[in-house]
Image (tube, rainbow, N blue to C red):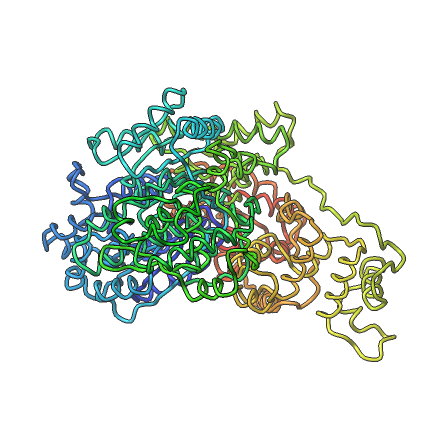
Amino acid sequence: MEAILKRYFGYSHFRAYQKEIIQKILDGRDCLVVMATGSGKSICYQIPPLVKGKTAVVISPLLSLMQDQVMSLKQRGIKADYLGSTQTNRSVSTDAEKGSLDILYMTPEKAYSLPPSFWTNLLNAGICLLAVDEAHCISEWGHNFRKEYKQLHVLRDVLVNIPFVALTATATEKVQSDIIGSLMMRDPYIVIGSFDRQNLFYGVKSCNRTTSFLEELVTEVSNYNANKSSTIIYCTTVKDTEQICDLLTNAGIRTGIYHGQMGSKAREESHRSFIRDEIHVMVATIAFGMGIDKPDVRCVIHYGCPKSLESYYQESGRCGRDGLPSICWLYYSRSDFAKADFYCSEAQNETQRKAIMQSFMAAQKYCFLPTCRRKFILGYFGEKSISDCGNCDNCKGTRKEKDLSRESVLLLSCIKSCGGRWGLNMPIDVLRGSRSRKILDNNYEELPLHGLGKDHPANWWKALGDLLIANDFLKENLRNEYRSVSVSLKGLQFLSTANTVHETPLVLAITPEMIEEEEQGSLQRRVGDLQSLSFLDNQEFSEAEGKLYRMLLDIRMKLAKDNGTAPYAICGDQTIKMMTKRRPSTRANLAKVDGVNQHLVTKYGDSFLENIRRLSQELNLPLDNGALVWPTVQKGACTNTRGKTSPARFEAWKAWEKDGLSFQEIANFPTRPAPIKVQTVISYILEAARDGCELSWTRFCDCIGLTLDIAMQIRGAIAKIGSTERLKLIKEELPENVSYEHIRTLLTVEELSIKVEELFAGKTADEAPVQVRESPVSGHDAEVKEERGSCEDGITGKDAIEPSESIDKRASVRQHRSVDGRDVEDSPKKLQKISEQKGKCGGTFEATGNSLLEWIGDHHDGVSLAEIVERFSGSERDIVANLLDVLEGEFLIFRKNDLYRAM
Ligand SMILES: Nc1ncnc2c1ncn2[C@@H]1O[C@H](COP(=O)(O)OP(=O)(O)OP(=O)(O)O)[C@@H](O)[C@H]1O
C-alpha cells in the first residue's frame, strides 16, 4: 500500500485512518467515513483499485467535481474518467465496461440510467468498490439533500458483495444513520475523524454594506490577488455576486463569477480559469460549493451569513485543503437573519423545515459568538475540545470587553415585561420609546421601561440581544415559523441579583457591530485587519529562497498550461516549498520530496531539475541542501559544570556527551548501587538538555533511531490528540516502532525551539541513524536485528547475481515492475554505468541494480542502508548508494522510516 501511495500520490505516509479504511475496503467491508474537508478521504477509495487491479466506481454529485478529480488522477498516472450527461466521449462507457479504468466517476442519475448489461460486464471485468462521495446528500437531515441520492440502494441489488463506501465531511448522528440505512450497508466499518481544520483561521465581521465597507473589501482582496493567493468570495444572492464582481473588476482585479443563472458554458469557463490559476479571485453563490477540489485556496470570504453552520463548515472548508495556513472570514449584516423564512420555504415537510431552521440559527449564533469559534464549530458537530484554539478572531484577543450590566438589565426586563412572546424587535422598540400601532395595541407604552433605551440605536440593542442569547441569558424559542426570545433561568437569576443601579457587573465582549454603532458608523477596523497577508508569508524562506519559490510556482504554471491541466494537479504548493528548500539536483533526490510521484518525475522531472539547477546558481543557493550541519543547542548554561540541573541528570549527560559512553554503559555504571533502565538514562539526558546542557542532537537522534519520518508521525499524532500532555494517548496513535523515547525527544527538541525540519534537513541515506543505533528503545530495533541475523544466515549462492547477466535481468524486472515502459526508459543505461564502477572492495556480493532490487524485494518489511551495505560489501558504499538513488528515482524502490522497500 505504501508503495502505491508513493508511486501515484508521492506521499510517504498515510494520514490518520487512511490505511485502516483501505484495509477494510480490501477485506470487502462496507465503510462509512466521516472526516473533515481536506483530510484525505479520496485516497481511501482511490488506492484499493490500484492494489486490486479492479475498477472503483465513484458516485459524485457534481460534474465539475468529477472533471477536476479525473484531471488530477490522470496527472498521477491513474486511469480515470467520468460518465455524466455532458460526457460526449462514448468510448468512456465502452472502456469502463471492459474494466480498463482504475476509477470511474458518475452522477447518481447516470448510475440509474446505465443498462443492466453495463453492470454485468463491469462485474465480470472486475469492480472493487462503490464509493458514494458527499454522502450527506442522501439524508433529508443533511444540509444538501439530493433526492437522486436517495435511490442509490438500487445498486445494492446489482453489486452484490461489493463493498459500499460512503464518504462525507459533515454528518450528524442522524445523517450517519440515514446514510447507513439508505445504502443498506451491512455491518459497516465506521470512522469518525476530527472536524478540526487546524490550519484555518476563523473570523467574523459585521458589515453594513456601505460604500466604504465595500472599498475596504476591494483593497483587501486586491492584496490577496497581488500575492497570487486564490480567494473565493461566497455571496448569498446573484445580485451580490454581480455587484462584488463589478467592484473588483473595476479595481483592475481579474475576477471570475459563478452562479446558477449563468449558462453552463460560462460557468465551466469561469471554473476552469480559477482552478488553472488564470484568475485568482472567484465571486460565487454556493452553486460553486462542493465542486471545488482546488487544494490551494488561501482565503474564503462569506459575504452574508450562510444558511446553515454545516454549509459554512463545508464552504469555508474549501480553503487550505493542502494543509497550509489559510483564512476564513464571514461578513454578516443584520438583514441576513431575515432570510430564515426564505430558506424554510425550500422544505418539503416539517422535519426538513425544523432541520433548516435549527442549522440556520446555529449559523446566526456563530456570527455573534464572543468565545472561541473553533470550539463552537467542533461542539456543534459533537466534538469536544478542551482548550481555546488561539487561531480565531476571538482567541486572538482583539475583542473589546465592556460592563453592559445596565443595558442588559433593561433589555432582559423589557423582554420579560412583554411576556417573552416576541422576537427582539418589539421589546427594543419599547425601550426606544416607539409608539407604533403594535405597541399601543398592547399598552406597552405604559411600561416604566418605555423610552429608557433611546441612547442606543436599534441595531446596537439587537447586537446586545444576540450577545445575551450567545451567553445564555436569553433563550430562543421556535414556534411554527416564528422565533421568539424569552429570559432564561440564568437571565432570571441575573435579574434577581441586579437592579437598574447595576450593582452586579456584567462584562461582555462587545461585537464589532456595537463598536461601529457606538462610533456612529465609522469603520474602525479594516476588513481583514486581524489576519493580514503576513500570516500567509513564507517566513521559513530566506530572501533568495523566496524568489526561487515564486519562480518555481511560475514554472509549474507554465508546465500546467502547456499540458492543459491545473498547476495543483502537477503538485501542491507544499511540494514546491519542499523543492525550494531541498533544491534537488537528481531525479532520485527529486523523488524523495514528499508529494512527488512517479508521473511527475517522468513527465516534468527534467524541467524542474533543469530550472532548479539554473535558478539556484543564479541565486547563489547550494543544490541538494545536504551540507547542513545539525545544530546543537547554544544555551551554554552547562558545558562542563552542573549548572542548574540535578546531580543524576548531570552525571548521565556528562557520561554520554563528554565521555562518549553508550546509554547501556551508563545504565550499568559500576558505581551505581543497582543498574537503572536505559529509558531512565535517556530521560535524564533529555532533562539535562532542558536545563541548559548542550547536547549533540545529531548523535542523540541517531542513537535512539529518531528520524524525520518518525518525528512527522509524532507531530501528526499530537495534532490529532490536540495536546502534548498525555504521552500515552500520543503513543497509542503511533505505530509500534515509535517509542516513548522518540516522543520525549521530539517534545524536548521542540521545547528548545530547535527546528525539527532543519535538524533533519539534508540528512541523506548515508547518514541514516541505523549505523549508530545502540539502544533497544523500540520494538522496531529488535525486528531489524532479528532480520539482519537471518539475512546473514540465509545467504546462498543463488542470491548472488552474476554481473554479466545482471543488466538484462534487471531490465526485465524493471519492465515488470513499472507502470508503463515510458516511465523508466533510460534506466538500464544509467544502472549499467554505475554498476561498471563496482567491485573495488572485493567483498562477497557485488551490487547491481538488479541484485539490489531483488534482495530488497525479498525483504517486505524493509532493509536499512547499513544492512544493504553489509550485504553488498563487494561494492563500494558510494556505488551502492548511487544505485539505490537511481532505483529510488525510478520508483522501483522507496524509503519509509529509513528502510528501503521495493515498489
Ligand atoms: N497521506 C497523505 N499525505 C499527504 N497529503 C495527503 C495525503 N492524503 C491526502 N493528501 C492531500 O490532502 C488534500 C486533500 O485530500 P482529499 O481531496 O482526499 O480530501 P477530502 O477529505 O476528500 O476533502 P473534501 O471533503 O474537501 O473533498 C489533497 O491535496 C491530497 O493530495
Examine the rendering and report whether any part of residue 225 can be seen. yes
Q: Nearer the viewer, residue 263 or 776?
A: 263
**Horizontal and vertical percent for residue 505?**
56, 56
In the image, 582 versus 132, the foreground residue is 132
Q: Residue at x 28, y 66 (%)?
A: 177
Is 615 drawn above or below residue 200 in the view shown? above
Q: Where is residue 809? Give x, y as percent.
A: 44, 48
Q: Quadrant of residue 537?
A: top right
In this view, the residue in front, 668 or 783, is: 668
Q: Position of residue 650 (x, y in %)?
A: 84, 63
Q: Residue furthest front?
A: 446
Classify the position of the N terminus by image quarter. bottom left
Horizontal arrangement in the rendering, residue 668 relative to residue 517 (left or right)? right
Give the residue at the far bottom of this rendering: 673
Question: Is residue 807 at all visible to an observer of this figure?
Answer: no
Q: Position of residue 736 (x, y in %)?
A: 55, 67
Q: Residue at the spot x=81%, y=58% of the render?
A: 657
Up-down: is 589 above or below 615?
below
